[in-house]
Amino acid sequence: MGPGDHAGVRSADGRLEALLSGGGGARRMASAAALELRLLAPLAAPAVVVYMLIIVMSSATQIFCGQLGNVQLAAASLGNNGIQVFAYGLMLGMGSAVETLCGQAYGAEKYEMLGVYLQRSTVLLMATGVPLAAMYAFSEPILLLLGQSPEIAGAAAEFAYGLIPQIFAYAANFPIQKFLQAQSIVAPSAYILTASMALHVAMSWVAVYRLGLGLLGASLTLSLTWWVLVAGQFAYIVLSPRCRETWTGFTWAAFADLAGFAKLSAASAVMLALEVWYFQVLILLAGMLPDPQIALDSLTVWYVATQNEPIVLSSSLLCVRIR
């Protein structure tokens, strides 16, 4: 939704407020509920698709790795949910600062500031990705220090090496998503992610089965898919008339007040990252059990089978924040 559409939303909100402030009555409440549903549905459906496919994309990678053997499945679980989740939670939390600032700027009709906040957050998250990449590079000794099986730790480290490019894709993706969500633009991300998911499955099959690249090939394919997603969304921002007033090009203002922006991002990271990291703790604990292969494989199967269940609720809450 571009700035020109914002007036239409305000008009609909005004009608909704008039209905709710006019007193009770089943007919009036039913009209208000129908109006609210019409406003939320175009946001909720694409948001559900986006969050579902993000989970499915990682799950698909683990499924391909599971075809290679029990050790490879355990290693993919440890690498994807034990190592990668740390970066995902941190980047998602820090990127969420853009949601607050872009929402405020959009409401105040300071449209050009949305592009500045997008770039500033990307700069900060890219810098944060450097120490995270170093952690990935030394993931094997870190996992051994945490009591993981040497065989699985070595294989998980191989998987993690291929996820290093994904860190910097996160750094670009999360600010872009929040930039679009602040303008109630959700559907394009869903379309781009759907196409990226189809490409991911095809590339994973080629990398794992045809080229025999194993764990490293599977994780590199996942990283490449995330960069395809980033490129598609950024191309939409640059080319779409809906973002013409909010994206005015690259600017040196992105490097201003990085310290203050870092404090706000850190506060967001603490709140959101903790919601994601709990599963990482479960994975690391499972890797310390007497038979880590069975424990990690079982957790992976549970994750693939059940992790999509809360998506509809969480995406609906996201839409409430967007509205």
Image (spheres, grey):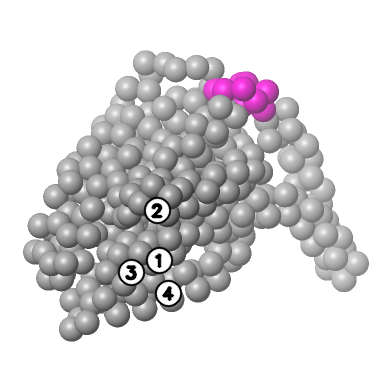
Give percent across and percent down for residue 105. Answer: 53, 32
Per the image, the residue denoted by label 2 is 208
Measured Cα–Cα span from mark 3 to mark 1: 6 Å
Q: Is residue 129 above or below residue 67?
A: above
Residue type at numbered disc 1 = Gln
Q: Residues within 10 Å of mark 1 (few under 14, many from 20)?
A: few
- Along the horizontal axis of the image, is 17 left or right of 322? right
Report helix, strand or loop for mark 3. loop
* Residue appearing at x 29%, y 29% in the figure: 258
| Residue 296 shows up from this direction | yes
Give the mark toward the camera: 4 or 1.
Answer: 1
Nearest to N terminus: mark 4 or mark 1:
1
Per the image, the residue denoted by label 1 is 67
The magenta region covers 238-247
Q: Which mark is residue 129?
A: none
Tag 4 and tag 1, C-beta contact below 8 Å: no
Q: Residues within 10 Å of mark 2 (few under 14, many from 20)?
A: many
Residue type at numbered disc 4 = Val
* Residue appearing at x 55%, y 64% in the figure: 311
Q: Residues within 10 Å of mark 4 (few under 14, many from 20)?
A: some
Residue type at numbered disc 2 = Val
Per the image, the residue denoted by label 3 is 69
264 and 140: which is toward the camera: 140
Measured Cα–Cα span from mark 2 to mark 3: 12 Å
Report helix, strand or loop for mark 4. helix
Per the image, the residue denoted by label 4 is 301
Report helix, strand or loop for mark 1. loop
Q: Is residue 71 above or below residue 261?
A: below
Tag 1 and tag 2, C-beta contact below 8 Å: yes
Write down the quadrant of residue 6 in the picture.
Answer: top right
